[in-house]
Structures are given as structure tokens and as C-alpha cells.
Amino acid sequence: MASKELIKNMIAATKTLYSYYAKDTDIKTLVNLWGMTLQEFPDDITEKAFLRALQTCKMPPTPADVIENIKTLASVNQPTNEELWSVYTKALRDTERQIYYISYPMPGVDHRQKITDIWESLPDKIKQYIGSKGELIRMSNYDDNTLKFEKNNFLKTMPAIQTRIESSGLMLDGK
């Protein structure tokens, strides 16, 4: 959540660069308005986006400019679908290995927990594609031929999952 302190600093910076900015506007109202608009975004991302807006805007930046830059920064930090495919196939291999180790347990190692850890470490896009930890376990048995078909399906499905995530606002965690 963008803090009031950060928003005050952003408005002060804008007033410093653009002396006419908000000349006839109550600063407290302006801070509250910016705060309501940017409340869902963390300070670090908001600050980076604001600085980027200052670098690119020819007029004083608005909350809409900051949000646009937040979205741009979020998309820049997102892995490509091919990179996600690599993460997905590594998770399948790691899960398959843990399932094997369940049959031959090592003292002090909880292989079921390791499978849970693999599932929880996956980006949201991959989790939505797979559906559940049980499906991850089932899919870990895929052979190379099945994975070739699976890759095509994965790459075709990712844009729809991306759209669904963006519309629900889950992209800001970088996953």
C-alpha cells in the first residue's frame, strides 16, 4: 500500500519540478486523492513508477501516469512463456524425483513436504495452468512425447491465463 509519506514526497517532488502544479489545490485533498488511487500498490513499486513517470512525462505526472508505469514495470519483470515452460518442466522433474524417493525414504527427509514446497514455489501462471498439487504429481509422470504435446498446449494457454491474472490484479507480486 502506497504510504501517505511517499505520496507527500511525490507531490513535493512534482511541485519542485513544476512550480505551478496544484497551486490552487488543497494539498491534503491532493494527498488523499493520490492515496486512494495508489492504495493497492506497494511503496517500492510506486516510487519506481513515479520516478519513471517524472523521466517520461512532459507535464506533471498524474496517478494514471504512475499506474501506467507500474503496469509497465510489472510486465518487464515477468518471465517469458518459454522461461515459464522451463520452470514448469523443472518442477515436473523435481516432483517425479520426490515421488521416487517416497518409495525409498531417507531418514529425516519429508519428500511429501518437498512436493508441497515445489508446488508453492511455482509462479501463479503455472499454478493456474496445472490446477492443483495433485495434478502436478499426476503430470510428473509425463514422458518426452507427452511433454512435446504439453508444451504446445502450455504455450497456447498462457495468454489466456495472463489476461485472467491481469484482470484480477495478481500481477504485482512478480509471479
Image (cartoon, rainbow, N blue to C red):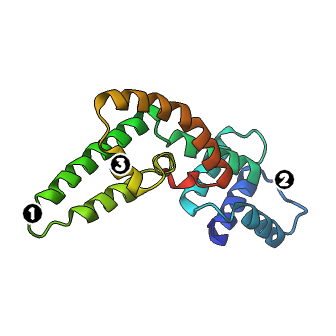
Q: Where is residue 78 drawn, in percent x and y?
A: 50, 42
Q: Where is residue 111 drawn, in percent x and y?
A: 21, 61
148 displayed left or right of 108: right
Q: Residue furthest right?
A: 24
Q: Where is residue 62 drawn, in percent x and y?
A: 77, 51
| Looking at the image, residue 79 lies above or below residue 145 | below
Residue at mark 1 to residue at mark 2: CA–CA distance: 70 Å
Q: Which mark lies nearer to you, 1 or 2?
A: 1
Q: Nearer the viewer, residue 49 or 54?
A: 49
Q: Quadrant of residue 149?
A: top left
**Image point (69%, 67%), residue name:** 8
Residue at mark 2 to residue at mark 3: CA–CA distance: 63 Å
Residue 68 circle label: none
User: Is residue 88 at least partly visible in the picture?
Assistant: yes
**Image point (67%, 38%), residue name:** 56
70 displayed left or right of 133: right
* Residue type at numbered disc 1: Met
Q: Nearer the viewer, residue 169 or 153?
A: 153
Q: Where is residue 96 drawn, in percent x and y?
A: 25, 47
Say whether disc 1 or disc 2 marks the residue closer to the N-terminus: 2
Q: Nearer the viewer, residue 89 or 102?
A: 102
Element under label 3? helix
**Image point (27%, 65%), residue name:** 113
Element under label 2? loop
Q: Which residue is mark 2?
A: 20
Q: Which residue is mark 1?
A: 106
| Looking at the image, residue 112 lies above or below residue 91 | below
Element under label 1? loop
Q: Residues within 10 Å of mark 1 (few under 14, many from 20)?
A: few
Q: Which residue is mark 3?
A: 138
| Looking at the image, residue 145 lies above or below residue 48 | above
